[in-house]
Image (tube, helix red, strand yellow):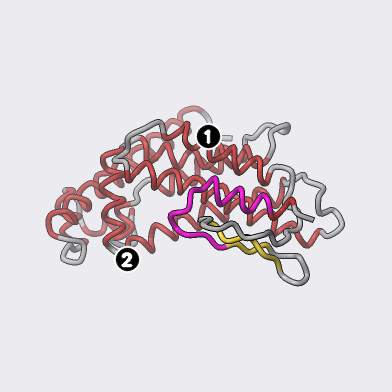
Amino acid sequence: MPDAPERATGSRAAAQRLKMRRELAAAAMELFATKGYEATTVDEIAAAAGVARRTFFRHFRSKEEAIFPDHDDTLIRAEAVLNAAPAHEHPLDTVCRGIKEVMRMYAAQPEISVARYKLTREVPTLREAEIASVARYERLFTRYLLGHFDEHAHDDDANDDPLLAEVAASAVVTAHNHVLRRWLRADGQGDVEAQLDHAFGIVRKTFGTGIGVGRATASTPGSAAVPATVSPQGEVLVTVARTDAPLDEVMRTIEQALKER
């Protein structure tokens, strides 16, 4: 086990690495804003940050990665939350605490987060990089839930476990991203953590006791969410909703389908 000096050295190195990544990201963001994303080169980003091209590539594989400097470290922190979870805590609560590390990353620098959000809306390549980052969190949470889901609704069919874990993890990430986008569109104003807790409460209520077999429900005129339907085997729940549908309405539609017998 590393002694105190070694741990201190490692912590300093990690802090210096994150500092350099953030400086490169700041330089990239400024150049993207003034010159445009396509017209900006890696050499220009490195020069603006006062480092060599090879230093840039020690930290990022491409210029699109440069505007997401904190995701690697945030993923590590989220995983640490999962690994240190108390035995009595519901696994969904643990995952919700884990993804809060992502929200805190954005909330720590609201102005930069808002500017980055606007930029990713304009540049498809950056949007794809952001989606790839989200997928990493989903995979982490799915693995955790698959190993810790302690529900009994599907004891008769253990093959449903991967589906339960993936759907629940996706619900947590979707709730987080819904709240995050709303906060970013509001220029980083408002109590985002309270909004996040409210969204997690909906997820916990819906999925906290296991995901039952869905059944179709009657249509509600004007509803933002189309009633959920299932496959003939009753193994897969499918629902369709407008992209602007309120999260609580979508979740109520899903919850109702899960309760129907």
User: Is label 2 in contact with label 1 (beta carbons under 8 Å)?
Assistant: no
Specify the farthest residue to the left: 34
Amino acid type of the residue that numbered disc 2 sits on in the rendered structure: Pro
The residue identified by callout 2 is: 124
In x, y percent, where is residue 84? 62, 35
- Could you say where residue 214 lies in the image, as x and y percent from the top left? 72, 59
* Residue 111 picture quarter: top left
Which dot, 2 or 1, sits closer to the camera?
Answer: 1
Residue 248: say if magenta.
yes
| Mark 1, residue position | 197
* Mark 2 or mark 1, earlier in chain: 2
Query: Residue 97 has which mark?
Result: none
Q: Who's the residue at 82% across and 47% down the image? A: 152
Q: Amino acid under label 1?
A: Asp
Q: Residue at x 51, y 57 (%)?
A: 222
Query: Is 137 drawn above or below residue 2 in the view shown?
Result: below
Across and down, in percent, residue 177 comes to 46, 48
Question: Is residue 130 found left or right of 232 in the rendered image?
Answer: left
Determine whether the residue tagged by mark 1 lies in a helix, strand or loop.
Answer: helix
Q: Is residue 212 left or right of residue 11?
A: right
Q: Which residues are magenta?
A: 240-256
Element carrying mark 2: helix
Residue 43 vertical position relative to residue 115 in the rendered view, above or below: below
- Give 136 or 121, whichever is nearer the viewer: 121
Check the image and report above or below for 137 versus 100.
below
Residues 225 and 87: in front is 225
Q: Is residue 175 magenta?
A: no
> Looking at the figure, which quarter contains the N terminus?
top right
Kindly give the residue lying farthest to the right in the view shown. Answer: 156
